[in-house]
Image (cartoon, rainbow, N blue to C red):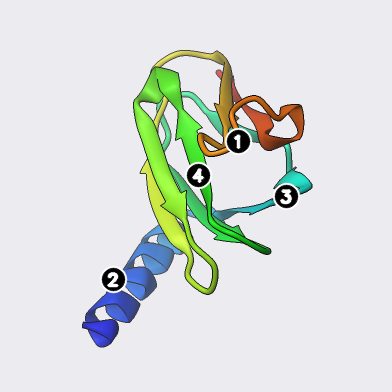
Amino acid sequence: MARLLIAAAILALQAAAAAGQEPIRLQASRGGFKPKVITIRKGEVAHIVLTTADVEHCFAVDPLRIEKRIVPGKSTELDLVSDHAGTLPFYCCLEAEDEAQKGRIVVTE
C-alpha cells in the first residue's frame, strides 16, 4: 500500500513537472497557513501539496467544494482548477473562527 502511495505521488509530481509547473506547497500550523496567499491561473491545473507543522488541520475552499484533512507526518495532495478569475478564500475547517487559519487563492486570467 505504501509503495502504491509513493508511486502515485511520484506520478503526480512528474505530471506537474512535465506541465512546467512546480507544485504549490502549503503548510498549516497553529500560527496559520504559509503562504497565506497563493496565485494560480484560470483554467490551469494547480497541484497543491499540503502539510502540517504541528497538529491535524483542514484545508477548505467552499466555492470549489474542497475539504481535505492534513495530518502530521503525511502530505495531502490535490489538484484544483478555477473557471473564474478572482479571489477564493480558504481556511482550516477545524479552526474556522481563527483569522490566522485563513488565506486566499488569487486566480488570474
**Image mark for residue 30:** 3
Q: Which of label 4 and label 2 is nearer to you?
A: 4
Q: Can residue 101 be seen in this view?
A: yes
Q: Which amino acid does label 1 sit on?
A: Glu
Q: Which of label 3 and label 2 is nearer to you?
A: 3
Q: Residue at x 40, y 26 (%)?
A: 43
Where is 19 relative to 61, above or below? below
What residue would you read off at disc 2?
8
Q: Are marks 3 and 2 in contact (CB under 8 Å)?
A: no
Could you tell me how far apart the alpha carbons at marks 3 and 1 are, in whole angstroms? 9 Å
What residue would you read off at disc 4?
58
Q: Which residue is drawn at 48% across and 65% down?
A: 75
Q: Earlier in the sequence, mark 3 or mark 2?
A: 2
Could you tell me how far apart the alpha carbons at marks 1 and 4 are, in whole angstroms? 8 Å
Q: Which amino acid does label 2 sit on?
A: Ala
Could you tell me how far apart the alpha carbons at marks 3 and 4 are, in whole angstroms? 12 Å
Q: Which amino acid does label 3 sit on?
A: Arg
In this picture, residue 29 sits left or right of residue 93: right
The x and y percentages for residue 29 are: 69, 53
Could you tell me how far apart the alpha carbons at marks 3 and 2 are, in whole angstroms? 29 Å
What residue would you read off at disc 1?
95
Q: Which of label 1 and label 4 is nearer to you?
A: 1
Q: Residue at x 56, y 29 (%)?
A: 90
Q: Are marks 2 and 1 in contact (CB under 8 Å)?
A: no
Query: Quadrant where the N terminus lies?
Result: bottom left
Q: Is residue 19 visible?
A: no
* 12, 55: nearer the viewer: 55
Q: Which amino acid does label 4 sit on?
A: Cys
